[in-house]
Amino acid sequence: MVLTFKMRELIDELKNIKLAIFDLDGVIYRGDTLITNSDEIIKELKESSIKVVYNSNNSTATRQKYVERLKKFGIECEIADFYTSASITAAEITKIKKNANIYVIGERGLREELQSLGHKIITHPINFEEIDFVIVGLDRDFKYQNLALAQKCILEGNAQFYATNSDSTLPVARGLMPGAGVMVNALITCTGKEPVRIYGKPEPFGIKMILSDYQISAEKTCIFGDRLNTDILAGNRAEIITVAVLTGVTTKEMIEDLKKQKSYSNNLDKNMIPNVVINILDDIYKK
Ligand SMILES: [Mg+2]
């Protein structure tokens, strides 16, 4: 089936696209519910020879879990299609040091991505000097004692502080829960140090990694995301085409308000304006 775009602006913007990057929550599904026809859209894009990959800031699950999740929704995919803030962080940390000793505040997804690249997770550091990195991601079992250990690795040892992402909130089926930024800020507060790097969106590391892996140029790549301050900002920073989808946390009014600003005090607000806005993924094709 030939992909045809419903909306004029999409016809103009997306006709040369070879690679489509999708945020997951709020774009393809919401909680445990598939957003109408997003499975069909993915299929259509692939049939039109457009590469499809997924980029999520959620570091808690392994990429294998995401594969199982999308397959349950009827979307064919494999591990290599996923770039999570955990897998991006693991790949970037490996460029800095191989076989590092790491203290993690985070969940299984982050620990397993780091271990799979040869790093050692030290769960009960005794000699703080031996820890190379403290890496912080979303931890839904966050404990004071773990924060204290991370603090000691940094202040009493020489560990460098890195983070997967700094999202303030985590969207769940019924509203919002605290995001990884809460854990990151706890460690900033008790160490007085900022992370050396935060690898998830809105930083463009993940998107640049995807472009490099697929050897496709930025102008032939687009991102579909529901958050302006992560997905769209990261996309604009990486200079790919940005499409905001209104099935998650962003409303049309929020985008209109940003566009209405006469001047921008910094590039941040300006960079959160998407190139294209669609109500739902289903808007991008006609049957
Ligand atoms: Mg999202």
Image (cartoon, rainbow, N blue to C red):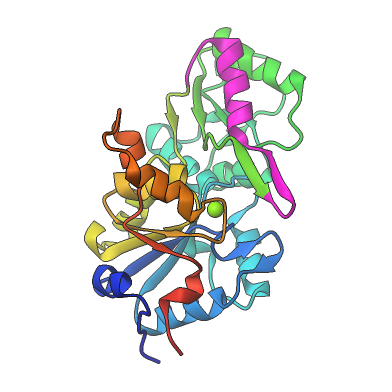
| Residue 234 coordinates in the image, percent (x, y) | 38, 45
User: Is residue 76 visible in the rendered structure shown here?
Assistant: no
Camera-side residue: 255 or 128?
255
**Occupied quadrant, residue 176:** top right
Which quadrant of the figure contains the N terminus? bottom left
- Above or below residue 15? Residue 217 is above
User: What is the x, y in percent for residue 95?
Assistant: 38, 38
Which residue is pictured at 36% across the width and 89% down the height? Answer: 2
Q: Residue at x 56, y 21 (%)?
A: 131
Q: How far across and how far down the image is residue 79, in percent? A: 53, 63
Give the number of marks. 0
Q: Is residue 202 visible?
A: yes
Compared with residue 11, is residue 97 higher up or lower down, i.e. above or below? above
* Quarter residue 67 falls in: bottom right
Residue 25 on image: x %, y %:
59, 57
Is 75 placed above or below 140 here?
below
Q: Which residues are magenta?
A: 172-194
- Quick check: 9 left or right of 80? left
Extreme residue toward the top, this view? 156
- Give the residue at x 31% y 40%: 270
* Residue at the (63%, 12%) spot, across then down: 152
Quick one: 154 or 17, which is closer to the camera?
17
- Along the viewing direction, whichever of 153 and 28 lies nearer the viewer: 28
Tell me, yes or no, whether the highlighted magenta stretch contains residue 237. no
- Is 190 on the left-hand or right-hand side of 209? right
Could you say which is closer to the camera, residue 62 or residue 141? 141
Q: Is residue 176 magenta?
A: yes
